[in-house]
Amino acid sequence: MGAGLALPALLDVESGSAATRDSKSDKSEDSSFDPWVAIYAENFRHNVQEISRRVAGRPILAVIKNNGYGTGVANVARILEPQPEVSGFAVVKLHEAMSLRDAGIRKPILLLGPFDQKNLEDAAARNIMPMVYTPQGDALDGVAAKLQKPVPVHICIDTGIGRVGVPYYQAAPLIRDLAARKSVQIQGTMMTFTEDAELDKEQMRRFQETCGGLEKEGIALGKKHAASSFALFQHADAFLDMVRPGMAVYGIYPENELRHTNVMDLRPALSLKGRVIYVKKLRKGDSAGYNRAYIAKEDVWVATLPVGHADGWPRIAPKGAKVRIGSELYPVIAAVSASHCIIEIGGEERVKIGDTATFFDWQAGSRPEDVSEACGASVYDLTMHLSPLLPRRIV
Ligand SMILES: Cc1ncc(COP(=O)(O)O)c(C=O)c1O
C-alpha cells in the first residue's frame, strides 16, 4: 500500500522563540504569494508537557488523524516522537497510518478507522494496531498465523456515543472471545465520551462496570483510555491509564469556555498565513464580493488575500473574524470565495502588496479560539479543513 497523498512540507528549522522565528521566516520566504501553514515545534513540546503535568505523567496517545489536524500527519509525528510523554499515535485512515511508518515513525500506532482482512494483514505487518469492536477473532487468528506473531489490538466499547464500538451491554462475550485467543494481544480498551455533562458520568460508570466485571474474571484489558482534550479539563477519574487528546496537543482549547479556566496553558502550534495580493480604495457605494456581499458606506481601503474556503478558511469568516497584518486586526468582509477573501483596512492605505497576513496563530487576539468566538467557526474546522495542498513550514 502506498503512502497516500504526498504533502508539501518545507522544513525550516530555526532556533529561538516562536515569535522571533516567525518574523525571521516571514522575511526569508517572501518570494511566493501562496498561503502556508506554519508549525511551531516548540509549542507542540510545551503542550505535551502541559498535558503530561495535568494527567500526572500518564502516557499520552496523541491523536493526529485528519492530516495531523491540518499540520501534516508526518510533520506532527516527527515532532512528537522524541517526546517521552507521548507513548504513541492514533489516526483514523489506514493510509495515514501507513504514511507514518513510511516516514520512519516507530512508536505504536492505533488505527481508529475501519479495515478489511487484507488491510488487517498489511496493518499488522507494519505494527499498526487495529481498534476492534466486531467479531474479528477468526480474521485475527489468520493474520497472526501468517505473521507468526500475535496481533496487538485495542478494543472499543460504545458506552453511549453510538458511533463505533461494541455496545457496553454486549461487550463481555466479544472481549472474552478475543482474550481467549492466542492470536490476540489486548493492549488497550477504550471508549469515547459524548461530552454531555450528564451522560459522560453515566458513560464512565458503564465503562468501569464492564471493564471491572471482565477484570474480575481474570481478563487483562491492557491500558484503559477515554479522555480526549475535553475530558482533560474534567474530573481526573476519566484519565484512567492513558489519555487520548488531539486538539490540546495542537495547543487549542476544544471549547471556547475552557480558555478561561487555569487547567492548562495551551499554545497554538500552527498558524495560517498568506500575503496581501492587492490593495485598493472602494468608493462610497462600491461593492465587494459575489452578490455584492459588501457595500462601502463611505470611501474605504480594502485588501485582497489569496486565501479562500478551498484553503480551509471558513465561509462564515465575514461574520466577525479578523486577520492580523503587523499588529493591527482587520475585519474580513464580503464573501469568502474559493481562493480569495477581502479585508477592510479603513480610511487610509495602511497595508501594501506582499505584507504578511495572519489568519490565526498563537498570539492573543489571533488564536484559533479568537476566530472561532468571532465568527462561529469551530476550531476543529479551522484546523482539520486546512487544505493538504498548502505548504507546511516547520519553524
Ligand atoms: C476516538 C477519538 N479519540 C480522541 C479524539 C481526540 O479528540 P480531541 O481532538 O477533541 O482531543 C478523537 C477525535 O475526534 C477521537 O475520534
Image (tube, rainbow, N blue to C red):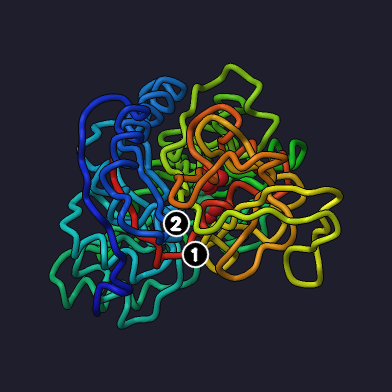
Q: Nearer the viewer, residue 152 or 282?
A: 282
Q: Residue at x 74, y 63 (%)?
A: 288
Asked if the residues shown at circle 1 and circle 2 are in contact, with their CB atoms under 8 angstroms apart, the answer is yes
Which quadrant would residue 312 be assigned to in this image? Answer: bottom right
The disc, 1 or 2, on the residue closer to the chain's N-terminal end is 1
Q: Nearer the viewer, residue 150 or 258?
A: 258
Query: Number of labelled discs?
Result: 2
Q: Nearer the viewer, residue 146 or 28?
A: 28
Q: Is residue 56 left or right of residue 208?
A: left
**Would you place residue 362 above or below residue 50 in this image?**
below
Residue 133 circle label: 1
Q: Secondary structure at mark 2?
A: strand
Q: Residue at x 15, y 57 (%)?
A: 104
Question: In the rendering, at what x and y percent does residue 211 appear?
Answer: 51, 44
> Looking at mark 1, is its residue's CB closer than 8 Å to ligand 1?
no
> Mark 2, residues whose alpha carbon is within 10 Å: few (<14), some, or many (≥20)?
many
Q: Is residue 345 left or right of residue 44?
A: right
Residue of label 2: 155
Quadrant assignment for the N terminus = bottom left
Q: Residue 258, can we see it?
A: yes
Q: Nearer the viewer, residue 261 or 111?
A: 261
Tell me the kind of residue under disc 2: Ile
Residue 109 circle label: none
Tell me the kind of residue under disc 1: Tyr
Question: In the rendering, at what x and y percent does residue 68 appear?
Answer: 40, 54
Which quadrant would residue 163 be assigned to in this image? Answer: bottom right
Quadrant assignment for the C terminus = top left
Q: Is residue 163 left or right of residue 72?
A: right
Q: Residue at x 27, y 58 (%)?
A: 9
